[in-house]
Amino acid sequence: MRDTEAAILAALRSNRYRFVYNPLTNKSKLVRFRENGEIGEGRNGNEYSWRISNSRLEIINDKNQVYSRFFLLPDKVTLHHTNDPDLPSLKGQYFEPTNG
């Protein structure tokens, strides 16, 4: 678990991401994760801050609720939605690293 959490943290620190928030329409935005747990670029009421819990990246909304949850793929940089039923976000979302 510690290795996975360290890998998630390393990925977030070193990448700018294209966040596909609506996979049905391919709607996306650019996102950067700040060291302090805030979302920088791409921040809104749904994607407000972040934390790592139980080897998952959790995206927290502006009401301090878990809005979405992601697991790290074997490539160590791409993150996919867990599709857990308790989450209000769209299923199938993902973060992929982008250049720039």
Image (cartoon, rainbow, N blue to C red):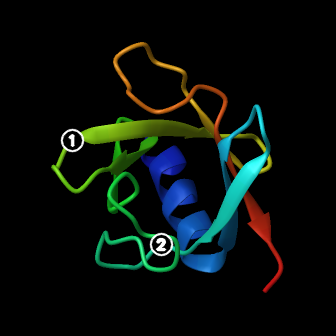
Number of residues whose C-alpha sits closer than 10 Å to that of mark 2, classed few (under 14), some (14–19) or many (20 or more) = many
Q: Left or right? Give the position of 59 relative to 93.
A: left
Q: Which residue appears farthest toward the top when viewing the image? A: 85
Sooner in the amino-acid sequence: mark 1 or mark 2: 2
Quadrant of the frame with the N terminus: top left
Name the residue: 22% across, 56% down.
62
Give the Cα distance between marks 1 and 2: 18 Å
* Numbered badge on residue 21: none
Q: Position of residue 88 (x, y in %)?
A: 38, 28
Query: Mark 1 highlights which residue?
Result: 65
Camera sees residue 77: no
Q: Left or right? Give the position of 38 relative to 64.
A: right
Q: Position of residue 98 (x, y in %)?
A: 80, 71
Callout 1–callout 2 Cβ contact below 8 Å:
no
Q: Which residue appears farthest toward the front when viewing the image? A: 25
Residue 7 image-quadrant placement: bottom right
Query: Mark 2 highlights which residue?
Result: 33
Q: Left or right? Give the position of 3 relative to 100.
A: left
Kind of residue at badge 2: Phe
Helix, strand or loop at label 2? It is loop
Q: Position of residue 18 (x, y in %)?
A: 71, 63
Number of residues whose C-alpha sits closer than 10 Å to that of mark 1, classed few (under 14), some (14–19) or many (20 or more) = some
